[in-house]
Amino acid sequence: MLDERKAKVLRAVVEEYIETAQPVGSGHVAAAPGINVSAATVRNDMAVLEQEGYLHQPHTSAGRVPTEKGYRFFVDALGRPSELRSVDADQVRSFFASAHGGLETMLSDTSRLLTHLTHYAAVVVGPEKETAVVRSVQLVGLSARVALVVVVLSNGAVDKHTLEFDEDVDDLRLSAAGVRLAGLAVGHPVAELRDLPDDDEPMDAVLAAALETLRGGERPEQDRVFIGGTSEMASAFDAVGTVAEILRILEHHYVVVSLLDDVLGRGLNVAIGTETGIEPLADCSVVVAPYTVDGENAGTIGVLGPTRMNYPQALAAVAVVSRRLSNRLSEGHQER
Amino acid sequence: MLDERKAKVLRAVVEEYIETAQPVGSGHVAAAPGINVSAATVRNDMAVLEQEGYLHQPHTSAGRVPTEKGYRFFVDALGRPSELRSVDADQVRSFFASAHGGLETMLSDTSRLLTHLTHYAAVVVGPEKETAVVRSVQLVGLSARVALVVVVLSNGAVDKHTLEFDEDVDDLRLSAAGVRLAGLAVGHPVAELRDLPDDDEPMDAVLAAALETLRGGERPEQDRVFIGGTSEMASAFDAVGTVAEILRILEHHYVVVSLLDDVLGRGLNVAIGTETGIEPLADCSVVVAPYTVDGENAGTIGVLGPTRMNYPQALAAVAVVSRRLSNRLSEGHQER
DNA sequence: CGTTGGCACTCGATGATACCGAGTGCCAAC
DNA sequence: GTTGGCACTCGGTATCATCGAGTGCCAACG
């Protein structure tokens, strides 16, 4: 364990490095508020911190840079809980007070809000539809052999799937299937549709196809992930190659979703560098928080920035936004 | 006008610069196939081409780099029509043969296809809903004061808008409004809803609100723009600042849409550098093509890359994809 | 007269060298 | 245990020479 002064030294190094992105030397640390010892003493401490793996020296006679272990200790033990700056807090408040529009709109705007607060890339993952209750199902014919299944869920999400038939299907048959489909699905959670209704009445091919699609959960990430602020993220790095690699990751939504889930699953709020488990993100950190609807875990929000991100600020922003988003989404769910 | 040999020289410079991203000298041009004169002669021609504004010399004793005017001439007069490589052509064919899913899925996948073909960022803009015919409208209650308007259009697009009421609205009232709304809207193009149906029957507040939303076309760009391949785009530049600026533009979908519309509106397929009219895109070029559904102009596809992009290849890719996309989307629109 | 080889010249890129200074480790003194 | 002093390290910056790709100009050539 780190003695109290060494912890202070480590904190000073991390904080200054986050700010300047330059290796920090003993002189600067000694000048930091709260450090009341000489540079020489700081040097001794830093030598120990390096041996213990909290700091790293790019080369002899350079300052020190935090290692992942250093950041980790900073986040776990040293991060003063840091409030949002009140301007930002106001902004969050007013955002959620005035927010309107459907679920998707809301989530997309939330990602913009998070970017604005943190200046890093923001990721918002919408609720899985699994637990949501089907509020309405409709079959709409588009052409002789193509129809659309449109599902409205209780959380405000709208799902659509295309059906293609092998034979022409007339309106009558379509609407009959639609009615039966509605009868089967409305009022039930999507997940329940999987245990088929065990009805011995023969099933129309149209109905069967539509049910199959509903169960399938085809392309589940497609409309669930909202990513913003990639430009802000880009400016935080200096190698264009790094930026390109990160963008490539972000383009694969399912990777992003599983990354966030994985981090939360490990019980963490923060994944630092290689802790993300994704090699191209070795220079990145991720700060995540779940949000809830009516107390149920619903989705995840997070920000992605360089490992030398401002963790206290990012943690505060993510926490506040997730809390307020949860409240906002839980409003007025009592009725109907 | 350029004499034939000077044109060949210009083409050689552009082609080599596109390939190497290095200023090209007279020696290389003289060695290019089709140029059967000496380097000295090429030098004379290049001096003229520079005076005429087609080429630029970063500094004395460096090779030449094409100017925007040079690229423009290349694209307008020198671009040999260039087929896609047959591997790629096959890929496009098989993509559209096996493509399935709804409009949005299709467009999103198309953007991925374009990226894959060109290695630049790809933009696909979906049809405006204006001309599409409403195939189905539905009002779905989410909570006592919140309902969703879900509209299915003939082109397969699904639009959704949230309604918030000042007072509780019960299911009866909602479904009544839904029925009347459907009666008014189904079968008509969205644009027509604007000339209100001039009905003197008093209009329920719910119905009025829903109609208003339909007309509003609120957040029209939201679900219409599909952008992919930003990581490939990033690798084409070497300054991270440039990349960040471009990403910022791409995040503003409405800017992208109006850029593409603007270019097409000027009757162009290509906008080079400042021709885009967007300052941060000074180092970028855009290649665009419209696509049609049943002969009607429907949307736009395009790629965005560095000014030294491979124009013939990009033009070919965009042309082929737009053609096949048009065909695909026009299929089976005869009935219903 | 357009084309060409020859030639002096330019100037960025590359590499060697020196220098500076921020930072270190160590040590003796407090 | 802490501190000031000090010799040392080494990356960054600046200076300078060198190299070579490329140029413009010119005289000669068919």
Image (cartoon, coloured by chain):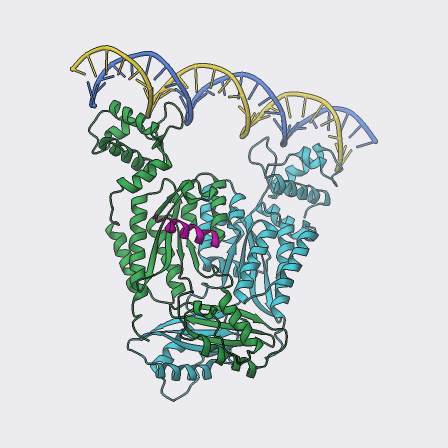
Chain colours: A green, B cyan, C yellow, D blue
Q: Measured from the top left, where is residue A139 in percent x and y?
A: 51, 76
Judge whether residue B126 can be spotted in this image: no
User: Which quadrant: the N terminus of chain A?
Assistant: top left
Return the residue nearer the eye: B127 or A285: A285
Taking the magenta stretch, the answer to whether it contains residue A7 is no
Taking the magenta stretch, the answer to whether it contains residue A258 is yes
Return the residue nearer the eye: D25 or A304: A304
Q: Measured from the top left, where is residue A106 in percent x and y?
A: 37, 62
Q: Magenta part of the protein: which range?
A: A253-269
**In the rendered image, the vertical position of residue A257 relative to residue A163, given as above or below:** above
Q: Is residue A164 left or right of residue A313?
A: right
**In the rendered image, the vertical position of residue A228 relative to residue A152, given as above or below:** above
| Magenta span: chief secondary structure | helix
Return the residue nearer the eye: A274 or A13: A274
Kindly identify the residue that appears in the image at 21 percent across and 31 percent down: A35
**In the rendered image, the vertical position of residue B244 relative to residue A35, given as above or below:** below
Kindly identify the residue that appears in the image at 74 percent across and 39 percent down: B35
Q: Measured from the top left, where is residue B286 in percent x and y?
A: 56, 53
In terms of image quadrants, where is residue B138? bottom left
Q: How many marks?
A: 0
User: Which quadrant: the C terminus of chain A?
Assistant: bottom left
**In the rendered image, the vertical position of residue B205 relative to residue B102, given as above or below:** below
Judge whether residue B25 can be spotted in this image: yes
Kindly identify the residue that appears in the image at 29 percent across and 42 percent down: A76
Q: Measured from the top left, where is residue A197 in percent x and y?
A: 47, 74
The residue positioned farthest toward the bottom in the image shown: B201
